[in-house]
Image (cartoon, coloured by chain):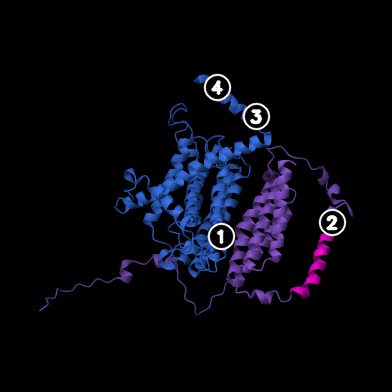
Amino acid sequence: MSEMIDRLLAIGVDLWSWFPADWQTFLLILGKIILILAPLMICVAYITYAERKIIGYMQIRIGPNRVGPRGWLQPIADAMKLLFKEVIIPTRADRFLFLIAPVLSIMPALAAWAVIPFDRGIVLSNVNAGLLYVLALTSIGVYGVIIAGWASNSKYAILSSLRVGAQIVAYEIAMGFALVGVIMASGSLNLGAIVEGQAGGLSSWYIWPLLPLFFVYFISGVAETNRAPFDVAEGESEIVAGFHVEYSGMAFAVFFLAEYANIILISSLTSLMFLGGWLSPFEGLVGADHWLGASNLFWFFAKACVFAFCFLWFRATFPRYRYDQIMRLGWKVFIPVTIVWLFVEAVMVVAQVGPWAA
Amino acid sequence: MTITDFLFFAFATVVIGSALGVVSSKNPVHSVLFLVLTFFSSAAIWLMLEAEFLAIALVLVYVGAVMVLFLFVVMMLDINVAKMREGFVSYLPAGLLFALLMLGVMVWVVGPVGPDVMATAGLDKAVRHAADYSNTEALGEILYTDYVLAFEIAAVILLVAIVAAITLTLRRRPTTKYQTPGKQIQVKRNDRLKIIKSDAEVLK
């Protein structure tokens, strides 16, 4: 038996070396991408289940409990249903743009994961300008929504896409400024270096010196993903379902895949930039050989899960913002807050207090 | 052909194709989207030139913000396409003339004829940097030392432009009613609600 496994392994190695070097690199990268995206997609499926369960319990009901044990197969059943539904294209809709809009919406949500480090050195692409790359990609996610609204040839959809356009442009500025604070603190645009800069336990995380920026970033993140209480893009009570009102079947599902992938992305980014990513909060208190003190993937997931839970919690708690108040919060509150705190931070850098103590 | 050559030609083809799409497509929304694609592919080419900061800034600023607003405006326009295309033939000679002039200047500057700009700037001897070379850092270093004055002046000009744009659009008409959210949230129960005690009435 073992002889056979050895022979199979040898054949495998032979096959691998038979590929040209370029192809080997290509296949290796492809393998890594699948290794990141497959678990991500499972997470996305189960965060929808978690959302329905958590909001259910918050509203004193049980939530999905029929499909499979305790309703665990609910996301699979939903996916099956959506796969088999017909994709309807409205009359006089722009056919090509209508169909490409969901793709444009999910593409940046997935591509941004290329630079997210999961643990020390475990990252698909260790880009120097990683933070900028993430910011650039999340900023083009809005095209999917705008194009969907326009191509649907429906007034509700276009109203929604106008709302989204204004909202995302407004909150992106606040988000960018909050990230400038992180860059100033770490002196690097590389996400791995940003996490390493927070080494030294709970007290050296960037959340403490950058507390206002942390709040601005996370709330802007909620607004960027069009989640409640900033979900005027969907606004069921006013514009039916907003930009995806004309979509059905898988085209509709892809928008939701993108939304939940973005939720996980924002949660992960917040934990990387403000809560030290994979670093253990007990660093320095207990030894690195103890499971609590060891910095690993577990801490990264735990922190990201806390934020993902907050997204669901917000949805169950807050009523929807009125549109003019969303604009006011973005332009008149968040942007001034970030600018003021950047000045405070600059003073802290010069005076060498906090993490800048040389 | 190496993989980088292949990528360059692929992106260059997309740039040229989508740039043609910008001027030739009938629907202005399609034109804007073609322009977005042009920017995006140019950013990819810049990335291959090791100018990652500029490439990402192009995507972030132009694709992520400027073009979104552009699309916004174009989507709202009610354009009569047939009327817009009326003057096409009469404008064509002038357009072609300027296109040729531009092409001529570019060939003169970059190409083998005329002053060898590439050689004087040392661009023909550009070397590939190692993987740890950070274009962002290099750009920041030169921008905040050698060119700090020009950089600051540009920043001030932009600030003035922002202030001017806001003052131009900010006008308060006396007839418009505004809400003050600060006052709205300070409302107490007693301002709005009055509880009156009344005796129970018995229906006969």
Q: Which mark is residue B143?
A: none
Q: Judging from the image, what secondary structure is the residue with disc 3 in?
A: helix
Circle 3 sits on which residue?
A17
Mark 3 residue crowding within 10 angstroms, few (<14) / some (14–19) / many (20+): few
Is A121 situated above or below A329?
above
Relative horizontal placement of residue B7, taking residue A200 as reference (left or right):
right
Q: Secondary structure at mark 2?
A: helix
Magenta range: B88-108
Closer to the chain start, of discs 1 and 4, is: 4
Which disc, if any, is residue B107? 2
Mark 1, residue position = A169
Residues flagged by tags 4 and 2 on a common chain: no
- Give the residue at mark 4: A6
CA distance for labels 1 and 2: 38 Å
Q: Are marks 4 and 2 in contact (CB under 8 Å)?
A: no
**Could you tell me which chain the residue with mark 2 belongs to?**
B
Under circle 1, the secondary element is helix
Q: Colour of chain A?
A: blue
